[in-house]
Image (tube, rainbow, N blue to C red):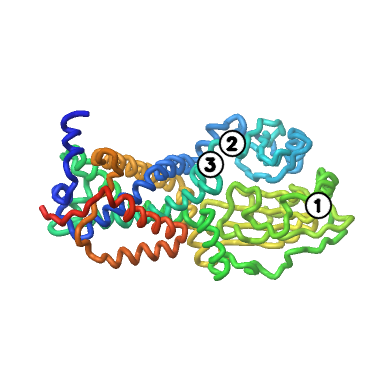
Amino acid sequence: MSTTQTAERARPQNSTTVAATSGPVHPGYRTLWRWHFYAGLFVMPFLLVLAITGTLYCFQPQLEPLLYRQQMVVAPQAVPRLPDNALLAKARAAMPPDSVATTAVITRDPQRSAEFVFRLADRTQQSVYLNPYNGDVLGTLSVERRLMQADRMLHRKLLLGKPGELLMELAACWTLVMIGTGIALWWPRGKTTAPAVLLPRLALRGRPLWKNLHAVIGIWLALGALAFVLTGLPWTGSWGKQFKAFATATKLGAPPGAWGGLPLRSSVPGAQADHADHASATVAHAMHADMDSMPGMVMDDLPLPLKPWAAGDARVPSSVATAAARPLSLGHIVALAASLGLTNGYSIVLPNSATGVYTLSYFPANPQHERTLYVDQYSGAILRDIRYGDYGAIAKAVSYGTSLHMGRFFGIANQILCAAISLGLAALAVTGFVMWWKRRPQRSLGAPSRERGAPPMRGWKTGLVLLGILFPLMGATLVAVWLLDRLVFGRDSRPEPHRVA
């Protein structure tokens, strides 16, 4: 270690040093700094993961055809596409006999292959890709092991299941604390003006430069970071589920019964039977217990990679089978969807039981076009047709937030904006780590020392209490951090009086 670094690390980080680089220290500064430090210390590693995985996932539409060109991309041809029934039959023939077709991805892009998702005997999922012009099998991909799916699960759950999902939720909540305290620390006071602290001061050296870069990057990204947190929380596994249930119960989501008076179970007119390919095999398989028709299933339980948030709690209806009933073919359902305005870019969950239904999920870039349909597999009756207009105020806001969060709403510009915010947050994590590394004492956490005679700061305390009530999981960790600060970390940070440069 150089002499300069040793001197900088040994130098007391008192209020005079702080004031020299950021203006006069105000009462409560060190209390805010202390909480900002704790929030950043916890959030920093998760922020790096979220930034990198979020940036990658944002460019999924461009990356996947490059990564899996052999399976996903075909040369356009002048001949018509094969019927969907024929493509499904060829996909079934290419997969193991004990596999079950669960989802058909409907696309009319002349350069994209046809994709069908199968559930294998070990309950994993595998996609099979076919040339839509001649039916040739182009290859298969594991749904769970595809790079973008692994990236998504890392983004949401750290690949750790429920514990990872809760950790990511906590990190998002603590980011709110980090943003709030960061803005308060940056806020210009005295003779300092906002323009003077909105641009980096590159003439600084050492830790003051890193601190200045950290503050400037943070204030420019504060709004975007806040938007990322608020639009991501509704998709979390703990608070997000409770929030969705609240939206549904208060009719601010997509309340049950908002889609018309059609029954959840339809009757089957025996005369209306469309002889689908593999119909007898489908009906025979349907007599076995199957996960696609469990009582009480909701949209979130279906094998769909993406689906509208508002429809997640919608109960999946059921078809009614009779001895003479035969299920409609996939081609019939695709034609029905086209007559209802759905022609491209949607997924169909196939019925795999006698009471299963066809579930159509359309999740486009524009939330106002989102749509979820449940179709009786025998009669073709529309059991439910959930549209954006049926959503409540909360669900509409979440739909727009999701589209923006994923970089889908206004094309490539939205993707670039999301990537810039994500990489900026990664830069915040890096600069914060460097600042801590430069000032940390030996054999100590290095939390900012307490100030003597700190003001009551009732507004900030009220804000933390409200955050803890709104996000109970975070509330528990707030109490834990406060106790650790008082009982453990407090020993390493003796109170200091306020000093003004």
**Which residue occupies 19% across, 33% down?**
5
Quarter that holds the N terminus: top left
Can residue 27 be seen at all in this image of the molecule?
yes
Q: Is residue 253 left or right of residue 501?
A: right
Q: First in sequence, mark 1 or 3: give its number.
A: 3
- The secondary structure type at the circle numbered 2 is loop
How crowded pointer 2 is (Cα within 10 Å; few <14, some 14-19, many 20+) is rated as few
Q: Which residue is mark 2?
A: 145
Judged by depth in the image, the label closer to the viewer, 2 or 3, is 3
Label 3 near label 1: C-beta < 8 Å?
Answer: no
The amino acid at mark 2 is Arg
Residue toward you, 378 or 118 = 118
The x and y percentages for residue 129 are: 66, 35
- The secondary structure type at the circle numbered 3 is loop
**Which residue occupies 84% across, 61% down?**
269
Disc tally is 3
**Label 2 to label 3: alpha-carbon separation:** 11 Å
Residue toward you, 384 or 463 = 463
Q: Is residue 204 left or right of residue 417?
A: left
Q: Which mark is residue 327?
A: 1
Q: Which residue is mark 3?
A: 159
- The secondary structure type at the circle numbered 1 is loop
